[in-house]
Amino acid sequence: MKYQKPHEDQKYIDGLVQNNSFVIQSIYNKFAPKVISYIKKNSGDETNAQDIIQETIITIYNQAKDKKLVLTCPFDAYFFLLCKRKWLNELKKRGTKEVTINEEVLSKDDDAFKHAEETSLYDEKYHLFKEMFNQIGTACKDLLEATFKIKSMEEVAKSLGVTYAYARKKKSLCIGKLTELIKASPKYNQLYN
Amino acid sequence: MNEQDYILFEAYLTESLSKEELASFEERLLNDKDFKSAFELYKQVNGFLEQAYSKDAQEFKSNLETISSDYFNSTSSQKGKVVSLWKYAIAASVVIIFGLFMFNNFSNPTYGDFADYGEINLTIRSIQGDVIKDAEDAFNSKDFTKADKLFTELLEADSNNTEIQYYKAIANIELSNYNTADTLLENLSKGQSVYKHDALWYLALSKLKQEKNDECLNILKTIPEESEVYDKAQKLVKKLD
């Protein structure tokens, strides 16, 4: 893919990655009202909007931290698309039949669609991972949580009363097991091919 | 993939393969499609885990929650305050305490004059919502025995949670379990958490409650000037000196 110059709104992504409160606040001030009014018009209320916006920001943060995210479109369009998708998914889950999708509100910015697509895919993969993580069994879960919280494998080994070599081996086998669970799930083919 | 492959993946990601091993690993990546895709997934899951449990991400989330509820509280008035209430409670109790302090200026300072933790609100930071809520309620209703029990339970699941360690210490001062309280506070004061200086402050108050005024003084004097508790520490120093 050829290098594309980041949009000036990349500052919002960078601010999120740096956990810059000022930037986060300005995202709320500038972009939340449109999402709130959309959700309110489509069978939701303000609390729903609060959750959707928060989850969307966390998703963007995760993707940007993990994969680097270079925005080539206005943040507004990208953010709104993501919130809207999340809300429509939520409505689907609830089984709400009547959804008035006001396509007029959507931006026709191609890059925004592309970015939103990527982020949604990342989000779905992340959720699949979370779901499978809850199934791997307590021993693995504890070990992995300790490993990624504490960071130093030596300390993890010490806190669990095992040797360093054993802890590291266990860690790789637990992640391996997790990848196998992910692969075996029906969603895997949908998301990875 | 077999176990050996996962061990290899891990070794590759932590850059602990020898030169020869590295060469053969990279060759396999090029020639073995299944190996490559298994490795890609392994790497991705590793990234997810890093993301899910990193300190940065936890801090980001709690910051975001604060900003989010501030934003939504100011747009709609019917919702209760979640986050900043206890801060106001502390600010208010500090004002009251200093008010009392002025009146009591000629009596000996006591722990009760200075303990200013106010109401606490822990709910926004954890997934163990119920236990957290119970602990918070117990603490706020001054049932410190119960609060201590619940804090201990929470720490079993999340032993690095400095916020819980801090309030557990305070509960133990209240219960006069000074050994427990002082050990927790000493560790916190040596760490790098936001409770570092508050821990020193409460460690000093714990000594005050034990009537070990000299020890109290010595601890107060180690509280640095840039700390938020510096001013009240200085007031107590003047009183004790």
Image (spheres, helix red, strand yellow):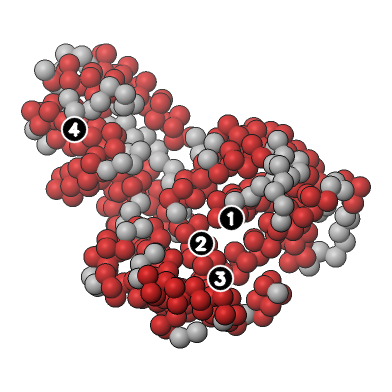
**Residue hosting label 4:** B204
**Residue hosting label 3:** B40
**Residue hosting label 1:** A67
Image coords of residue B105 (percent x, y): 20, 14
Q: Is residue A25 left or right of residue A98?
A: left
Question: Do marks 4 and 2 share a chain?
Answer: yes
Q: CA distance from mark 4 to mark 3?
A: 53 Å
> In front here: A130 or A9?
A9
Q: Quadrant of residue B205?
A: top left
Q: CA distance from mark 1 to mark 3?
A: 13 Å
- Asked whether the beta carbons under mark 1 and mark 2 sit within 8 Å of each other, the answer is yes
Q: Of the residues tagged 2 and 3, which is closer to the observer?
A: 3
Label 4 sits on a secondary structure element that is helix
Indicate whether B53 appears above or below B40.
above
User: What type is the residue that disc 2 sits on?
Assistant: Gly
User: What type is the residue that disc 3 sits on?
Assistant: Glu
- Quadrant of the image containing the C terminus of chain A: bottom right
Label 3 sits on a secondary structure element that is helix
Q: CA distance from mark 1 to mark 2?
A: 9 Å
| Residue at far bottom of view | B2
Q: Is residue B126 left or right of residue A78?
A: left
Q: Of the residues tagged 4 and 2, which is closer to the observer?
A: 2
- Residue in the image at 64% along x and 61% along y: A122
- Asked whether the beta carbons under mark 1 and mark 3 sit within 8 Å of each other, the answer is no
First in sequence: mark 4 vs mark 2: 2
Q: Of the residues tagged 4 and 1, which is closer to the observer?
A: 1
